[in-house]
Image (tube, rainbow, N blue to C red):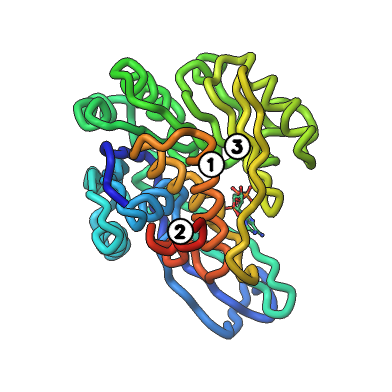
Amino acid sequence: MASGKPVVILGVFVADTAYRAQRQPRMGETILGNSFKLGPGGKGSNQAVAAGKLGADVAFLTRLGVDAFADMAKRTWKDAGVKSAAIDTPDSYTGAAYIFVEEGSGNNAIIVSPGAAMLITPEDIEANADLIRGAGVFVTQLEQPIDAALRALEIARGAGVTTILNPAPAAKLPDRIYALCDYLTPNETETEELTGLKVSSVEEARAAAGKLLEKGVGTVIVTLGEKGALLHTKDRSEHVSAISAGPVVETTGAGDAFNGGLAAALSRGVEPLEAVRFACAVAGISVTRPGTAPSMPTSQEVEALLA
Ligand code: ATP
């Protein structure tokens, strides 16, 4: 796939540290775990890796500490062809997530400490305004402070850059953010949080998406897990079925694969419905593989699935 116009993604990297054990330790207790796995995570970073592996020209804007996890972040991005626009923050630390996985049930309990990424300010965004203005597509989420996301969306919008807000994790949004979004890409839970409407079917997603359009969004894309995605604008509403690429192994990161795929396709000028289909294929492949960032496919793999 040709690289298209630049994609700039603002967001968070965290190192996922996953421990498997029979049970959680009680307070004051130490137990032996069964296994440990370290991997790259953070929604924004995963989305950048997805778009980068698809061949898009991607830069990732964040804050990192100056430590081993920062090195891991930069290596992850380099391997995926993502340019780092990370600001070093020596007096903080690179974000990390403690993920406890219960052996047998697979249930998990997680602590996320975002570290330096929580210190991203509107001034950081101003300092990178030219990077954002030079993009064809700008993407952000809600893991870093919202005032930084807002400022970045304003700058992007002011320069005619296509904007995508993935409103994850679920949170209430300030009213003025909606009109800055060409695309809003909530999953079912996030759509419920934003609208107060229940969303468990395509029809319910359509009703809720209508409410989000009224708030000023250009195009709402509700991701519906194994039911695919709904593209909803004032002129059309199209349900795109999920695209299966084999048995499902792990759905964590499916939303990130979808958003990275959407950004990559839009940056090449692909029309929105086709871009949603492409994004479903990217996510459809990612769920057949373990891990988040490592599960992202190449454009050749996606094109082979869609052929
Ligand atoms: P996560 O939080 O697990 O990263 P999400 O809740 O943000 O995911 P979903 O709506 O669950 O996002 O999934 C995003 C996209 O991934 C869907 O629109 C769909 O295209 C694809 N997808 C998810 N689950 C499956 C599945 N079981 N089979 C095929 N595709 C899937």
For label 3, the SS is loop
Whole-angstrom CA distance, mark 1 to mark 2, is: 13 Å
Name the residue tied to disc 2. Answer: 302
Q: Label 2 is placed on what type of residue? A: Val
**Dot 2 alpha-carbon crowd within 10 angstroms: few under 14, some 14 to 19, many 20 or more:** many
For label 2, the SS is helix
Rendered location of residue 180, percent (x, y): 45, 19
Tell me if residue 203 can be seen: yes
285 and 125: which is toward the camera: 285
Q: Label 3 is placed on what type of residue? A: Pro
187 and 87: which is toward the camera: 187
Residue 177 numbered mark, or none: none
**Looking at the image, is 41 positioned above or below residue 206?**
below
Of mark 1 and mark 3, the one earlier in the sequence is 3
**Dot 1 alpha-carbon crowd within 10 angstroms: few under 14, some 14 to 19, many 20 or more:** many
Residue found at x 74% / y 74%: 105
Tell me if residue 94 can be seen: no
State the image quarter where residue 189 is shown: top right
**Dot 3 alpha-carbon crowd within 10 angstroms: few under 14, some 14 to 19, many 20 or more:** many
Name the residue tied to disc 1. Answer: 276
Tell me the mark number nearer the camera, choosing from 3 and 2: 2
Of mark 1 and mark 2, the one earlier in the sequence is 1
**Looking at the image, is 241 positioned above or below residue 79?**
above
